[in-house]
Image (cartoon, rainbow, N blue to C red):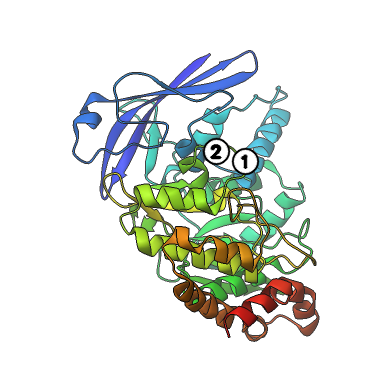
Amino acid sequence: MTGVIEVHVSFGTETVRAGRLYSHQRRGSESASFTYDDAYLASPEAYQLDPALPLVSGILQTRANQKIFGALSDCAPDRWGRKLIQRSERLRAQHSAATPRSLGEFDFLLGARDDLRQGALRFRNDEDGPFLAVDEEGVPELIELPELLEIAERADRQESNFAELKRLIHAGGSLGGARPKAHVRDRSGRVAIAKFPSAATDTWNVTVWEKVALDLARAAGITVPNSELIKVGDLSILIVDRFDRDFENRIGYVSAMTMLEAADGDQRSYLDIAGVIEQRSSKTSQDLLELWRRMAFAILASNTDDHLRNHGFLHAGGDSWNLSPAFDLNPNPSSGEKELHTAITEFDARATIKNLIDVAGFFRLDYESAMTILREVVDAVSSWTEVARHHGLTRSQISEMEPAFVHTESDKARVVTR
């Protein structure tokens, strides 16, 4: 079976058709192909949507075992959104006494509402049809957080009904990651992400500790989106700005996984991401220094969930893609030596200060400059207990998280930066 949809790109307030995406499903396998429109190829604003989609005429095919191009996967739902869509389909089938449909990548891609989709890509069936998925409901306001939290908790426990799942899909089906979340409008009216606690999986106060990490990262000189904590009863919800929106204008976004033409579960290194910056960034030196600073922070704050989907790039015009703000920063309190998801050197993922210093030259840093940056990160992260108390974490919660911030490598960092 082959399906086809139009792929459009937003440039500020204007949207143009870039080409057509074809889905191929046969005998349990799935792949995709893409063709650019001649008019798009002739446009001075045209840029390749994905490293695997160069600006050429003709049919472009996904690589072996790849179901959909990376840039399109980046604007489709990830684990949380997919779970909502799959459960909704099962409940729909039960209600109508039918067999649940087997959902493919097209179903997930078009299951996300158009106005909240990540990045600048949009989709529709034909030039006269609406952009998919159509949604007449507005984005929830902050006042609706208690209701959304209650529904998300039931969905997390797999106890929600069909109407509740549809409500969450409307509010958060386009979002990535595994944790419960939804879109809301913040106090200024901008679209933001509300991250909810998960009673089913959390073993510590994840949302508050993520806020602590975001504040520490900003103090360390790292670019992060604006965020705030909102209390609903005894629970804390983290509200984080969308950095792929300039109010209503969409900004192109792709993950590092897409830029490196990798797949989920693949490990690459920070040197690989630095290579993308060297080739694509319009502010190469600034982005390289920022990435090295983020590595230092990941080591000192035990941010070990730094997989390739948790690094991203924003389109900066033409062929340029600049490093996006840092996001999904979560300290890991497990004891002992830690490894990062994204390796520091080509073959070594150990989160050590030695590895960090050894690669400094690849980020255009001499030893003295590297020590200056590392000292700034050390000083910022050392305030972790004060920031944690500021956000209401208790003495026992702080003690539980101590191994994330006080460890052998943090001691080494303090020694080398004296």
At a point 42% along the width and 31% down the height, the residue shown is 52
Observer able to see residue 81: yes
Q: Does residue 199 appear to the left or right of 175 in the view shown?
A: right
Q: Nearer the viewer, residue 8 or 66?
A: 66
Q: Nearer the viewer, residue 328 or 271?
A: 271
Three-letter residue code for mark 2: Ala
Q: Quadrant of residue 44?
A: top left
At a point 72% along the width and 69% down the height, the residue shown is 205
- Asked if 238 appears above or below 340 in the picture, the reply is below
Q: CA distance from mark 2 to mark 1?
A: 6 Å
Neighbours of disc 1 within 10 Å: few (<14), some (14-19), many (20+)? few
At a point 48% along the width and 78% down the height, the residue shown is 372
- Asked if 368 appears above or below 69 in the picture, the reply is below
Q: Does residue 259 appear to the left or right of 339 in the view shown?
A: left
Label 2 SS: loop
Name the spot of residue 286 as percent of width and height, x first: 37, 64
Name the spot of residue 392 as percent of width and height, x first: 68, 82
Would you name the residue on which mark 2 appears? Answer: 262
Label 1 SS: loop
Three-letter residue code for mark 1: Asp
Would you name the residue on which mark 1 appears? Answer: 266
Q: Nearer the viewer, residue 369 or 95?
A: 369
Name the spot of residue 195 as percent of width and height, x first: 60, 61
Name the spot of residue 339 as percent of width and height, x first: 70, 57
Which label number is shown at residue 118? Answer: none
Task: Assess whether mark 1 and mark 2 are in contact (beta carbons under 8 angstroms).
Answer: yes
Neighbours of disc 2 within 10 Å: few (<14), some (14-19), many (20+)? some
